[in-house]
Image (cartoon, rainbow, N blue to C red):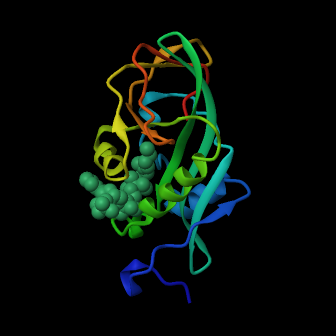
Amino acid sequence: MTTDTATDGRPFPVVRLPEFTRADLDEISGGAEDPFEVSAFSLTWRPKEEHFGVRRNGRLVAHAGLVTVPLTVGGVHTEAVGLGGVIVAPELRGRGVARAVVTAAVEHARGLGPRFGLLFCLPDRVPVYERLGWRELAEDVVVEQPDGPVVVPTRRMWTPLRPGAHWPPGPVRLLSLPM
Ligand SMILES: CC(C)(COP(=O)(O)OP(=O)(O)OC[C@H]1O[C@@H](n2cnc3c(N)ncnc32)[C@H](O)[C@@H]1OP(=O)(O)O)[C@@H](O)C(=O)NCCC(=O)NCCS
């Protein structure tokens, strides 16, 4: 039997997923039309390349994805590990599942090379990521879109992937679709 923090205090076990398809997303969200609630922005998002999930009684109930993205900060080229596609099945929210899957993804990201993690989220998700050690980025972030660069309309957050890493000052230009 699959157990969870609600029943025995143990964390939700996180597994690597070989891919993350629309069917996987539907399995988690219950087929929600706009599971991340960002469709109003009409942004094109970059697929993630590494995937972490939680299964419960055989069903996929959570996902977090990673993709390394190039960017310039203050005109200096660098890379960040983008976190995206974070979602937990509606009926399991508020029980530490996002903490489990995001923590596993960030631990993996620490071995990928870049000094920072970066994510985009809606304002009401900021406190969730703050609890997980992420910080808000005051700078606007310009991202690629099919018709040319735009200022991303969501909140921006970063987390250090190495001890002592600090987000550098200056304008931020993602040389990628947002993730
Ligand atoms: C955002 C989402 C992933 C959070 O998942 P979750 O499993 O409910 O989150 P957790 O229970 O692991 O909570 C993580 C931390 O955030 C805190 N938290 C959760 N909801 C919060 C809220 N509304 N305000 C403040 N803190 C909150 C929790 O207390 C926890 O901190 P703690 O462990 O220190 O107590 C989930 O609501 C979801 O799937 N939403 C729809 C998709 C989405 O918006 N994804 C984010 C895209 S950026």
Write the residue at 60% across / 19% down. 175
Q: Position of residue 12 (x, y in %)?
A: 49, 73
In depth, the one of 83 and 88 nearer the eye is: 83
Indicate whether 44 appears above or below 102.
above
Write the residue at 33% across / 46% down. 125
Pick out the residue farthest to the front: 164
Q: Quadrant of residue 90?
A: bottom left
Write the residue at 57% across / 58% down. 26
Name the quadrant where ligand 1 sits: bottom left
Q: Position of residue 68 (x, y in %)?
A: 63, 35
Q: Quadrant of residue 123?
A: top left
Task: Check the picture and name the quadrant holding the N terminus.
Answer: bottom right
Q: Quadrant of residue 151?
A: top left
Write the residue at 63% across / 59% down. 24
Task: Check the picture and name the quadrant holding the C terminus.
Answer: top right
In depth, the one of 94 and 162 nearer the eye is: 162
In depth, the one of 7 and 153 nearer the eye is: 7
